[in-house]
Amino acid sequence: MGDRLVIKGGNRIEGKLEVSGAKNACLPLMAASILSQDPVELDRVPDISDVRIMIKILEEMGVIVDYDHKGHMYLDARNLSTTRAPEEYVVRMNASFDVMGPLLSRHGHGEVSLPGGCKLGPRPVDMHIDAFKAMGAEVVKEGGFVKAKCPRLKGCRILFPKVSVGATKNSMMAATLAEGVTTLENCAREPEITDLAQFLVSMGAKIEGIGTQTLHIEGVSSLHGTKYSVISDRIEAGTFMLAGAITEGDVFIDNISIEMLENFVMEMRKAGQEVIEENGGLRVKGHRPINPLDITTAPYPGFPTDLHPPMAALLALGNGTSIMNETIFNGRYMYVMELGRLGADILVNNQTARIIGVKGFVGAPVDAPDIRAGGALLLAGLAAEGETTIRGVRYIDRGYQHIEERLRSLGADIVRVKEPLTPLP
Ligand code: EPZ
């Protein structure tokens, strides 16, 4: 079973919340420590289970990791014991594959199992592999592992056939120590990519075009240590902003810039929710009616796929029918059935959901099938009449640190019922 969250709905979410450092920024930064010939230090690393998985992966390869579980992390990757990542941890998280580029570029070899993680549909790494091959690596896939080797990668021009956060991260990291210049075209431009690029530059990497879809990386002979603070988690911020909206509350998210969430904020305002930029953060006042929307997810700066399920929870209480087109992950709709148990009326046809607004949710037991579906269920539980029990909290813990304490600090009636994971019969 694992831990459960029990929410008694109906309380307004109000008050100030400090957003965490970004999960999807700190994971590649941790992986990139492998590139450095000196120790690196990170601040604002969130205390979430994905960080703990990445720590395990790095430690099993010989990286010294010291994390105070309050944000500060010290990583020393000077003496790796192996360039083979431990499969038992890699299969639990898609971002584990971020270690491949650094291993290959710094050590000329890497063996990483095909990654697992959220069941959002197939999570291929073909574009990562094609980029490594283009830079001169010999790459084979066998026994569920990707094995890559190359004495020294060579810079070249790479055009990604589709925008990929993962492939952009791995190729950029690999190119930092390659011989010559690498030009990456059709790159992802997510703030987490920009954060990784700036981290690499702080280690001595030479990267031009940061924040654009074309990156020029001039390889250097080595990268030195650095101290770096992780950017804020825009997906966590958006989820908490929706908590204020769905409960007709008034919440202030500190330390988040509107630039990281421009499209999401525009849609929130179109939905009739008040979003105010103030004191370096964003304030949300929730209102009824919730206007129906027609949203299509897209790579940054488009509407983020990770806020699709949480936004769907709000729109499920809309004053009309909303449309949500998912263009990134086939398996993004795992939340629909679970929201339906709370009373939502959502019909999915191929990659499009019709969200027919209902008057309200009624609490029920539900299961979180992935991180962001878990976020959607949390929001629906906060607005539901009666009690909602969310099982599968391990998914929520992957992406939202100390979730129940932080929601309780904003007025939610939420408790965690601890229960050991019972092995399947
Ligand atoms: C990152 O996943 C994030 N994860 C995801 O967040 C996020 O939803 C996604 O980017 C899109 O923004 C992390 O940063 C750890 P992609 P990633 O490579 O890198 C296909 C969360 O909840 N593709 O941009 O895996 C792929 O199947 C997670 O925090 C290939 O076909 O995303 C998908 O359809 C969920 N071949 C699309 O591209 C490849 O080689 C975008 O994937 C790589 C990707």
Image: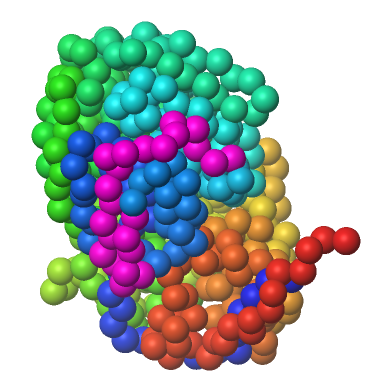
**Viewer-closest of 270 and 376:** 376
* Identity of the residue drawn at 66% across and 58% down: 369
Task: Identify whether 269 is placed above or below 175.
Answer: below
Q: How many marks?
A: 0
The chosen color scheme is: rainbow
Quarter holding the C terminus? bottom right
In the visual, does 161 lie left or right of 362? left
Closer-to-camera residue (355/259) = 259
The residue lying toward the viewer, choosing from 264 and 236, is 236
Pick whichever, 348 or 373, lies toward us.
373
Residue 38 image-quadrant placement: top left
Q: Is 1 left or right of 333, judged from the image as shown?
A: right
What's the magenta bit mostly, secondary-structure-wise? Answer: loop
Note whether 290 is above or below 180 in the view shown: below
Q: Position of residue 211 (x, y in %)?
A: 20, 36
Direction from residue 294 to residue 279 in the image, left or right = left
Please identify the quadrant where the N terminus is shown.
bottom right
| Residue drawn at (37%, 30%) of the image | 103
Is residue 121 visible to the viewer in this orientation of the structure?
yes
Query: Does the stretch in magenta take in 3?
Result: no
Question: Which range is magenta?
Answer: 65-87
**Image coords of residue 279 (percent x, y):** 13, 74
Image height of 296 relative to 260, above or below: above
The stretch drawn in magenta includes residue 75: yes
| Residue located at (54% from left, 41% from top) | 86
Q: Residue at x 25, y 12 (%)?
A: 155
Residue at the limit of the structure toward the right, as seen here: 425
| Visible residue check, residue 264 | no
Image location (x, y in percent) of residue 160 = 39, 20
